[in-house]
Amino acid sequence: MTENSQLAGQQSMESTELSDFRKGIIDWIKHNTPADPGFLLPQTFMEVGSEQVLDFLREWQYKVWSAGYLGMAWPKQYGGGGMPRLFQQIADEEMRRARVPICFNVIGLGWAGPLIIDTGTDVEKETYIKGILNAEDIWCQGFSEPNHGSDLGSIQTRAERDGDEYVINGSKIWTTLGNYAKYMILLARTDAQAERRYNGLSFFLAPMGANGISTSPIQKLTGEYGFTETFFTDARIPASCIMGEEGHGWRIAMHTLQYERGAEAGAAGGVSILSIVMDDLLKMAQDVERDGQPLLQDPITRDNLVKFLIEEQALYLGERRVGIPALCRDYPNSLALSGKLRGTEFFRRMRQYALTLQGAPGALYVGDDQAVDGGFWQRAYLNNFSTTIGGGTSQVQANIIGEHVLGLPKD
Amino acid sequence: MITRTANLDISFSDEQAMILDSAKVFCRDKSDITTVRSLLKSETGYQNDVWAEMIALGWTGLALPEQYGGSGMGLGATIPLVESMGRYLLCTPFITSTIAAQAILRGGTNQQKSRWLPSMVEGAVATMALLDNEDWGATQIRCTLTPKDGGFVLEGKKLQVNDAAVADIFLVLASSNGVPTLVVVEAKALPEGAISNNTLVDETKRAGNVNFSGVTIKADAILANAAEALQDVRLIGALLTASEATGTSAAALDTLVDYLTTRKQFGRLIGSYQALKHPTVDILLQMDSARTFIYHAATLISDAHLNKDTEIACRMAKAQATDALLFAGDRAVQFHGGMGFTYDCNAMLYIRRAQWAQHQYGDAQHHRKLLAPLLLD
Ligand SMILES: Cc1cc2nc3c(=O)[nH]c(=O)nc-3n(C[C@H](O)[C@H](O)[C@H](O)COP(=O)(O)OP(=O)(O)OC[C@H]3O[C@@H](n4cnc5c(N)ncnc54)[C@H](O)[C@@H]3O)c2cc1C
C-alpha cells in the first residue's frame, strides 16, 4: 500500500522496451481516464458505499483489465498477461501518478487472487481468477468477528459438515464490500473441540448468494458506507468450497495476510488506494498562507516538512533495499514485515499535520466551500485509519515485528 | 510550484557484500566488549596491532585511486567497514584518516596528492582540524592564515580534533583574508604543548584541542581547491559518522534485546511488556532507515564533487542515523532499570557514543536546516 515511486529512480536505466511500455501506458491513461463523474470518488477500496460508485469503478476496472494493464503478471490462461512483474509495477506507478480512479476489487486482486494462484487447484483458478480481474465477481473477506478482531485465532463462526455441504452459523464484521460481493474468503471453526484452537479452523471460498447469508451496512467514521456486518443463519454452502483441508484454515489465513500486509508479492496490481504523498503536502503548504506569507516559508513548518520528507524517502528507499539480500541479512524480514506499520503510520501523521497546517479552515469538512481542497485532507486523514486498523492494527504489527524479527517474548 | 524528483538509487555490489561480511567478522573478533572496555582509559584508545592489521588488509587504501597506492574502489566501499566498526565499537584513526585523505584527494593538486596520499595508504594518521567555534553549524572561521616571510603563518586554536595526539598530518581549516582555506600541517611542525587532550563524553574516542598559533607553512601546503573539497569533506564526515552510528544503534539494539529476553519481573520476561517491546521495535525501524540512507549515499557518492542528490543523501543519513542512535542509547539505559544506571552496563557505552556522534559534522537539526532549501525551494 505504501509503495510509491518505486521505479522513478530507475527510469534513467530503463531499457527501451520498458520505456516504450511506459510511454504506452501514459498515453493510454491520457485518453482513457474517465471524466469527473460529479460525485465523490473513493480514496480507498474500503469506501465503496453506493451503487453509483460501484458501477463506475466496476466499469473502470474492466477497462484497465481489457487494455492489459491489470493482472499483467498473472497466468495468461486465467485472464492474466503472463508478463514479468516489472511491467505491472510500471503500469501501477503511472496510474498512481496520474491519480486515475482506484481498482477496487482488492480482496480478489490483492489477496484471494494471489492465494488461489499460488496454492489453489486448477478448478479454483479456472473458476475464480478471471472474474476477479474483470470485476465481474467482487470479493470480500470474512475474518473479523464482533468479539474477535486482533485475536483472530479465537473466532467462533461455525462451519459444520452435513453431507456434501457445510452449514455456517455466526457473524462477521467490518466486511469491506460485503454487500456487493459474490464471494467471501471465510475463516470459520469446523472443530470446536480441537486441542489447539488454531487447528479447529478452516478456510472457505464461500458464495455470498447462499441462502442464510445477509449483510447490514455500517456507517464509517467519514459518514460514508463501505463495510458491513455479515450474518450467517444455517447458511448452506457446497463442501467443495473449502480451500485446502479441514483444519488447515489458520495457515491459509496467515498466508493471505502476508499478501494483505505486502510482505509477500503476488497481487494483480492496479492502484487500490489513492496515494497522497509529500508533494501534495508541500503544494498545500505553498498555497496556505499566514499573514500573507506561504507557510512553506515558515521556519518551524519547514523543519517539520523536512522531517516528513526524510521519513518518506526512507520508506521508498527501504522498499528498494528489500531487493538487496546482502543488506537484509542482519535482521531477516525486518523491512518486509515492517512495511505496513511504517507506511500507514507515516501517512497517518503526515495527513494529520496537513490539517494542522490549514489553520482555521482545517476545522471545515467536505461540503463546505471554504474547506481547503474541498476537504480532501480531512477525508484523507480519517480514511487513513482504515490502513492502521484494517489488516492487523499497528500495535499488532509491532508485536509481530518484535516477536518474529527481534525474538522478543509474546505478551 | 515544487517539482521534486527524489533519487531512489540504492545498490550493493558483490564486492561490497564481501567487504561487509569480512569487516563484521574482523571487528567482532578484534573488538569484543571486554577489549572495548579495557581501552576506555588507555592513552590512544585503540590497539596498535589492530590498526596495523587494517592497514595490511588494505583498508586505508580502499577508497583511494590506484595511482596513489590504493585499490580504487571509491568511498562507497568504506561504508560497510565503518558500519561494522560502529557495531563493535572498534576505534582506530581509520575514520578521521579516511576523511582527511578525501580532503587531499578532492582539494589537492596532483603534486599534493602524490606527496601525501601514498603515505596515508601506508598508515600515516591524518586528521581534520575544522572546528574552532561553538558548533558545526556556525560559519565563522576564527583560525587565520596570513603571509609571512615568503610563506604563511597560522593563528588560532582548533577544537576537538579527532585522534590529535597520534596524528602525523593535520588538515587545518583557516581563513585567509576571509576565504576558507585548507592547509596541511605536519605534526612535527607543532610546538611542544600545542595539543591538549579533551575529556570526551564518549570514552572510546580520543580528541584534543590543537593550538596552531605561530606554525608556519609553505605555499605548497595550501590545498589548491579548498572550497569544493571543504563542502565535500563536511558531507563525507557526516556520512561516515552516520555509518558508524548506524552500526552502534544495532549494537545498542542487540544489547537491549538480550536483556529483554533474559530479565524477568512479575514472573514474566520483561520483553513481553509492550511498553518495552514497541519502543524496541521502533529502534529497529529507525536504525533500518538510517541503514537505508547510508547505503543510498554510498551508492551515489563518487570521487567527483558531490552533487545535490548526494548532498541530500548524506544529510538525511546523518540526521536519521544520529537521531536513531540517540533514541537507541536513551532507551537502552532506561530499559535496563537500575542496571542501566551503572558503569558496568554496556548501555553506558552507547548512550555516550550517541552524544558524541550527534555533534560530529553537525547534529540532525543542523542538517535539516540545510536540507530545507534543497527540498523545499
Ligand atoms: C476500514 C476497515 C476495513 C476492514 N475490512 C475488513 C474485512 O474486509 N474483513 C475482515 O475480516 N476484517 C476487516 N477489518 C477488520 C480489521 O481487521 C480489524 O478491525 C482489526 O484486525 C482489529 O480488530 P478489532 O477491530 O476487533 O480491534 P481489537 O482487536 O479489539 O483492538 C482494539 C485495540 O486494541 C489493540 N490491541 C488488540 N490486541 C492487542 C495486542 N495483543 N497488543 C497490543 N494491542 C492490542 C488494537 O491495536 C486496537 O488499538 C476492517 C477494518 C477496518 C477499519
Image: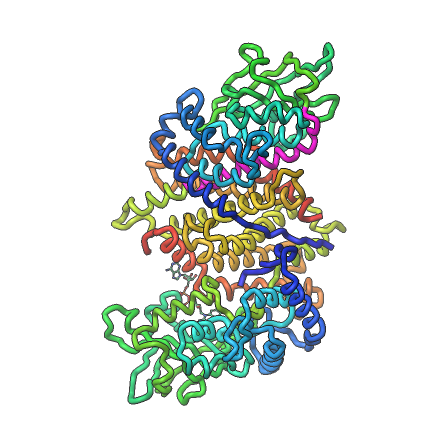
Mark yes or no: residue A59 visible: yes
Mark yes or no: residue B326 visible: no
Q: Magenta stretch: residue B242 in it?
A: yes
Q: Give the range drawn in magenta.
A: B223-251
- Residue A13 in picture, x, y percent from top left: 63, 56
B362 versus A261 height, above or below: above
Q: In which quarter of the image is ligand 1?
A: bottom left
Q: Nearer the viewer, residue A268 or A324?
A: A324
Q: Quadrant of residue A369?
A: bottom right
Q: Residue at 65% across / 67% down in the picture? A: A21
In the displayed structure, does residue A281 sit left or right of residue B330?
Answer: right
Q: In which quarter of the image is residue B329?
A: top left
Q: In which quarter of the image is residue A125?
A: bottom left
Q: Residue at 42% across / 67% down in the picture? A: A257
In the displayed structure, does residue A138 sit left or right of residue A302?
Answer: left
- Residue B75 in picture, x, y percent from top left: 56, 38
A72 versus B93 height, above or below: below
- Residue B354 in picture, x, y percent from top left: 48, 36
For the C terminus of chain A, the image quarter is bottom left
- Residue B21 in picture, x, y percent from top left: 43, 43
Q: Nearer the viewer, residue B251 or B343?
A: B251
Q: Magenta stretch: residue B204 in it?
A: no
Q: Residue at 46% across / 83% down in the picture? A: A127
Q: Residue at 50% across / 46% down in the picture? A: B291
